[in-house]
Image (cartoon, helix red, strand yellow):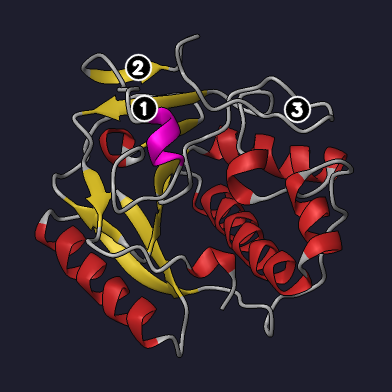
Amino acid sequence: MKSQIVYIKGHAKSEEQANDALKSFQRYNWDVELHEGYTPKTIPDIPSIVENSRLHNFKEENYNKYLTKVSCALNHLQFWKKVIEYNQPMAFLEHDAIAVDSLQNVNFKDYLILNAEYVFRPPNKLGIQKYQSFSFQGFGVNKLDNTYPLTYYRDNVWKGSFMVPGTGAYVISPSGAKKMLAAVEKYGLDQSDFMLNSFNLDIEYILPSPVKFNKVNLSTSYGI
């Protein structure tokens, strides 16, 4: 599986985790490379922002956090363009991703969550207390069902759709990448795990999960 690990150049802990990630994925024969992510100092032109979105609120409340979240979102846009260019499914991995298995010959439509077993467990901070009783069910590739707890709650066209549980590790197909770029062009940009929602593309997950988290969450998406 062709993959990229996004890290923050010049951030010692990010670089350290990215190298840990690289070694783990190479151990399981992923076709992986490191990729320097955007930061508030290096982001290009910012697309329009979705009204009544989380990203829009950050712009009003905390401009540094807003620019950091924009940087994260633009990393995904850049990646989706690469997926279309290569015309094959590719894995997006954040610096704290750790491989625990290989991934071969998997069939999915648009978007595949690779770390479902770990997203509501420490050290991840995604609503651990609120969602700790939820667990993904099934074996192999599965669709989200109505028991899934993460729904888009901002008052715009995406309200009520399923959001992805973070963006630490996923595979997206060329069809999914095209859908997401079209969605951003039509509606605008939001925080990464908000705009990646079931209104815009089909979301599936795989069990057992081939990716987990590193032992420490650096929380770099909250501002660096």
Q: Is residue 213 left or right of residue 194?
A: left
Report whether residue 89 is seen.
no
Residue for point 28% across, 40% down: 118
Q: What secondary structure is the magenta-colored segment mainly?
A: helix
Using the numbered discs, state the Cα–Cα distance from disc 2 to disc 3 in whole angstroms. 22 Å
Q: Which residue is mark 2?
A: 142
Q: Amino acid at mark 3?
A: Trp
Dots 1 and 2: beta carbons under 8 Å? yes
Q: Which residue is mark 3?
A: 158
214 up-or-down from 171: above or below: below
Dots 2 and 3: beta carbons under 8 Å? no
Disc with the residue nearer the chain's start (1 vs 2): 2
Q: Amino acid at mark 1?
A: Tyr
> Under tag 3, what secondary structure?
loop
Residue for point 35% across, 63% down: 217
x and y, in percent, of residue 87 in the image:
50, 45
Q: Is residue 106 left or right of residue 65?
A: left
Which quadrant of the rendered structure holds the C terminus?
bottom right
> Under tag 2, what secondary structure?
strand
> Under tag 1, what secondary structure?
strand
Q: Residue furthest front?
A: 129
Magenta region: which residues?
127-131
181 up-or-down from 36: above or below: above
Residue 129 in magenta? yes
Q: Which residue is mark 1?
A: 205
